[in-house]
Structure formats: structure tokens, C-alpha cells
Image: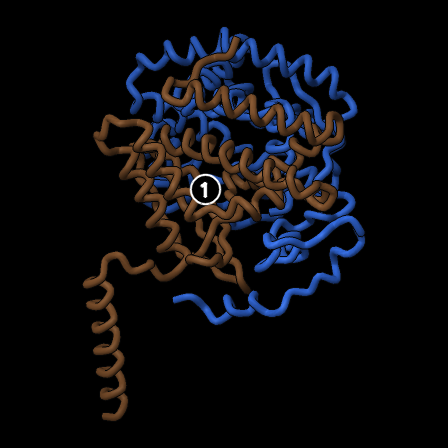
Chain colours: A brown, B blue
């Protein structure tokens, strides 16, 4: 009997909280999975919308991505040891450039899959890190994309993206460090600036073979 | 439902690990995460031997990479684009046929790596898909029986038994590889049923068709790397090595 009362109480409690959540749709989604899903689906909604104003679309997406991606941590992860030997000013320049580059890259990819459905697995939380596995369903082949998150100021934030078992941050780190070793920080920042201009110029054009 | 564990990270950060560099001054950025914690996030971030790739042939490799790149954009990709006249369901089926043909390779290598359960799964896939799936065209085993495909090859088997990757090589036509994985291509070839069932030119034609079909289904992955990365050669190299090391460790 007692057991039933407890169960009933629990049931009422959960129903109450569900109703509460339903009543306030803008409430921040609870776990890392839900928060990530919210952001990715919001991006896809913007991409799929008929709005003709491309720059407005891009701004909206950019705001969404910025809210969920921890560019600061990612930049630090990409520079690795070199972060310690980089001055304040260069660090912030790097963070700004890298955020924009990564945003373009991520958007380029997600754009080409905007028609596909994405499946989200439950988050695996260990200590203060979470991993959310997602699968992009692309004609019978599931492309695995794993997001790694840490708690940030306003919910969980992504600090690495792993595609086909390749960590994006690690990959950037080894190629950027190679450039740093051979040419130095100034060249790296210059190359990043040039690349960013190129990407922005061809943003709305389909990918083409560079001659 | 944010776990209690989350709160753990707000504990007083310890800066003791980063004081080796005198010029380094912690700033506002490090409020929540000190460098040690960020280093932990990415595993070996500040380790001395951070993710290194041995690439003594870099000059030759870059040359072959350049040739492959041209081959891709001027020969393979146009062919793949043309091949898109074939309806996509047919191309998906063709992809399944080629997957099915490498099931013996997957099975043998799962066995050699003592992954017995996986070997049984791959063998079942071969039997089911070759028969009910009409020569592998339909992935019946994957769609209805939950028998998932898992690629294995002799390179991974060698890695399993402790053979190092050697160094990075770019092979003409075939692309990124390592010394170990290149050598492993020889036994890989013998595990291909087409090698035993058809003559040399049919075998080559099959390989060509496989490549074109795969590319026709691909969503411009390589193009985006070329467009987006500062140095596509380095990006491809490091992605390949990461991918292989993960597969071997798995």
C-alpha cells in the first residue's frame, strides 16, 4: 500500500513537471542531448526555411552556433602547447578567426545534409563531460557525428566534434602546428584571414573544383 | 537533469600545472577551466609527443597528393557526376553489392583479431545478403536482422598484433596509407572474391566501377576539405592517421 502511494506521488510529480515544461516552451532544455538537439534542429529549421534573405539566415545560424559551441576552449585545444607561448593579442585574434573558420566549415557540412534526418543517441555523461552521438541518415548509410560537451555558463557547450572517429580539434591541431612550426604565428593568422575571405566569397555558391 | 558532477568543475582551479612557462599569465579566459582541465579534454594536449605523424617522404607524398588531386577533379569526379544518371536506389544497391563482396575480408580479419562474435555477424551477413539479398544488392541482414556491417582489413590485423604503422605514404590512385597498410593491401586483394572469379581486366573494371559509384554517392567530402582547409594535405594525412589508429585500438 505504502509502495503504491509513493508511486502515485512520483507519478504526480513527473506529470506536474512535464506539464510545467510543456507550458513554458522557452525553458532551457535539460540535458546535453536535449540542448544539442535543440540547437541542431533550430539550425536546420533556419536552413530549410524559405526566407530569401541569406544574410539574415546566416546571422541567425551564427547566433545559434555561437551559443552552443565553446570556441574559446576549442581554440585553446587547437593551439595546444603553442597557446602558452602566444601573446594575449594574438590569442584573441586567433580565437576570432578560428571561430569564424569553424563556423563556415560546420555550416558548409550541415548545409549539404539539410534534407536528411538526424538521430540523437542518449548522452553519456562522465564526470563533467558529455558525449552525444548523432547519426545523419543518408540513403541507408548512417554517418556518425559525435559531439563532446562540457558545462558552460548557459548550459552545455560543444568543445569537440568527432566525425568517423576523427576529432576535429585534434585534426586542426596537427595541421595548424605544422604551419606554426614552419612559418610562425603571423603567417598562420594571415593564412586564416585569407581563407576566411575566400570562404565568405564563395559561401552561396556550390562547391567547385579549385583549378 | 544536469548531474551533480557538473558542480565538481567549479571547484577551486589549481594552476600548478601550467607554471612551467614563466611568461604565461592566466587571464579571464581561464576562469572556469584552467589549462590542465582543457588539456584533459583533448587527452594529450600538452604532452611532448603529441599526436605525431612520421612523414619522411613528405615531398614525394605531396607530389603524389597533387597528382591524385588533379585526377580526382578532372577525371574521377566528372565520371562520378555522369554516373549519377543511374537512379540513386540502383547506386545504393550497387554499393551494397560491393560491401557484400568485401564481407569475406571483414570476416577473416575479425577472426584473425579474435573478434569471434563480429566474425559470425559478418559471415551471417555474407550468407543472408548473397542469397535473400540477391547477390548483396539488398542489405537484408542489416535492415531486418540488425546485423551491422563492420569493416576490417589486414592493416588493422597487423596493428592488432603490434605492427607499427611505419610512416605515412600517399599511394598513386589509392590515396592515403601507411607503410603497414600498403603492404596489407596485398593480402586484402587476395580476400576479394572478384580476384578469384574473374580475370584481371574484369577485376580492374570492378574496382573502377566501385570507385565511381562510391564517389557518385558522396556529398563532396573531399571538395569541402580542399575549399575549407589551410593545408588539405596535412588535414587529410592527420584524419587518415587518427582514423586508422582508432580502428586498430578498437
Residue on which the image places disc 1: A145
Image x and y of residue A153, in percent: 46, 58
Question: In the drawing, does residue B9 fall left or right of residue A43?
Answer: right
- Left or right: A48 with respect to B207? left
B222 displayed left or right of A175: left
Foreground of the two, B153 or A60? A60
Query: At x 56% / y 44%, what residue is drawn?
Result: A74
Circle 1 sits in a helix, a strand or a loop, which is it? Answer: strand
Residue A79 x %, y %: 66, 40
Q: Give left or right: position of A122 versus B74.
A: left
Residue in view at x 26 percent, y 27 percent: A53
Q: Is residue B112 visible?
A: no
Picture quadrant of residue A139: top left
Label 1 resides on the chain identified as A
Estimate how packed mark 1 is, as few (under 14), some (14 to 19) or many (20 or more) residues with alpha carbons within 10 Å.
many
Between A83 and A78, the one lying in front of the other is A83
Amino acid at each position: 500500500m505504502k509502495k503504491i502511494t509513493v508511486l502515485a506521488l512520483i507519478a504526480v510529480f513527473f506529470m506536474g513537471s512535464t506539464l510545467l515544461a510543456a507550458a513554458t516552451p522557452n525553458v532551457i532544455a535539460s540535458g546535453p542531448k536535449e540542448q544539442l538537439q535543440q540547437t541542431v534542429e533550430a539550425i536546420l529549421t533556419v536552413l530549410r526555411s524559405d526566407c530569401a534573405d541569406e544574410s539574415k539566415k546566416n546571422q541567425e545560424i551564427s547566433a545559434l552556433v555561437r551559443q552552443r559551441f565553446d570556441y574559446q576552449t576549442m581554440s585553446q585545444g587547437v593551439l595546444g602547447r603553442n597557446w602558452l607561448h602566444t601573446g594575449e593579442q594574438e590569442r584573441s585574434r586567433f580565437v576570432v578567426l578560428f571561430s569564424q573558420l569553424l563556423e563556415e566549415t560546420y555550416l558548409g557540412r550541415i548545409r549539404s545534409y539539410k534534407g536528411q534526418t538526424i538521430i540523437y543517441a542518449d548522452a553519456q555523461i562522465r564526470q563533467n563531460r558529455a558525449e552525444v552521438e548523432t547519426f545523419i541518415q543518408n540513403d541507408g548509410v548512417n554517418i556518425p557525428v559525435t559531439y563532446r560537451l562540457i558545462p558552460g555558463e548557459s548550459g552545455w557547450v560543444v568543445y569537440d566534434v568527432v566525425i568517423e572517429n576523427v576529432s576535429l580539434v585534434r585534426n586542426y591541431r596537427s595541421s595548424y602546428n605544422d604551419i606554426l612550426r614552419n612559418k610562425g604565428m603571423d603567417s598562420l593568422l594571415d593564412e586564416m584571414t585569407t581563407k576566411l575571405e575566400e570562404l565568405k566569397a564563395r559561401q552561396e555558391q556550390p562547391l567547385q573544383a579549385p583549378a | 537533469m544536469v548531474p551533480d558532477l557538473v558542480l565538481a568543475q567549479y571547484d577551486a582551479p589549481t594552476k600548478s600545472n601550467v607554471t612551467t612557462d614563466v611568461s604565461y599569465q592566466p587571464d579571464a579566459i581561464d576562469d572556469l577551466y584552467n589549462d590542465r582541465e582543457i588539456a584533459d579534454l583533448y587527452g594529450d594536449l600538452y604532452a611532448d609527443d603529441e599526436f605525431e605523424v612520421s612523414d619522411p617522404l613528405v615531398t614525394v607524398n605531396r607530389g603524389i597528393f597533387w597528382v591524385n588531386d588533379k585526377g580526382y577533379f578532372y577525371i574521377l569526379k566528372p565520371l562520378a557526376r555522369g554516373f549519377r544518371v543511374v537512379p540513386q536506389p540502383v547506386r545504393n544497391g550497387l554499393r551494397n553489392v560491393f560491401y557484400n563482396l568485401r564481407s569475406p575480408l571483414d570476416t577473416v580479419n575479425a577472426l584473425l583479431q579474435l573478434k569471434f562474435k563480429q566474425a559470425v555477424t559478418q559471415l551471417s551477413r555474407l550468407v543472408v545478403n548473397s542469397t535473400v539479398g540477391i547477390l548483396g544488392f539488398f542489405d537484408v541482414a542489416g535492415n531486418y536482422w540488425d546485423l551491422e556491417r563492420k569493416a576490417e582489413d589486414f592493416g588493422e590485423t597487423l596493428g592488432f598484433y603490434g605492427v607499427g604503422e611505419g610512416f605515412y605514404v600517399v599511394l598513386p590512385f589509392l590515396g592515403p596509407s601507411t607503410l603497414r597498410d600498403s603492404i596489407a593491401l596485398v593480402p586484402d586483394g587476395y580476400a576479394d572474391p572478384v580476384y578469384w572469379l574473374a580475370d584481371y581486366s574484369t577485376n580492374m573494371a570492378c574496382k573502377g566501377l566501385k570507385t565511381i559509384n562510391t564517389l557518385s554517392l558522396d556529398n563532396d567530402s573531399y571538395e569541402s576539405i580542399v575549399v575549407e582547409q589551410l593545408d588539405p594535405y596535412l588535414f587529410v594525412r592527420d584524419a587518415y592517421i587518427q582514423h586508422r589508429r582508432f580502428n586498430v585500438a578498437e
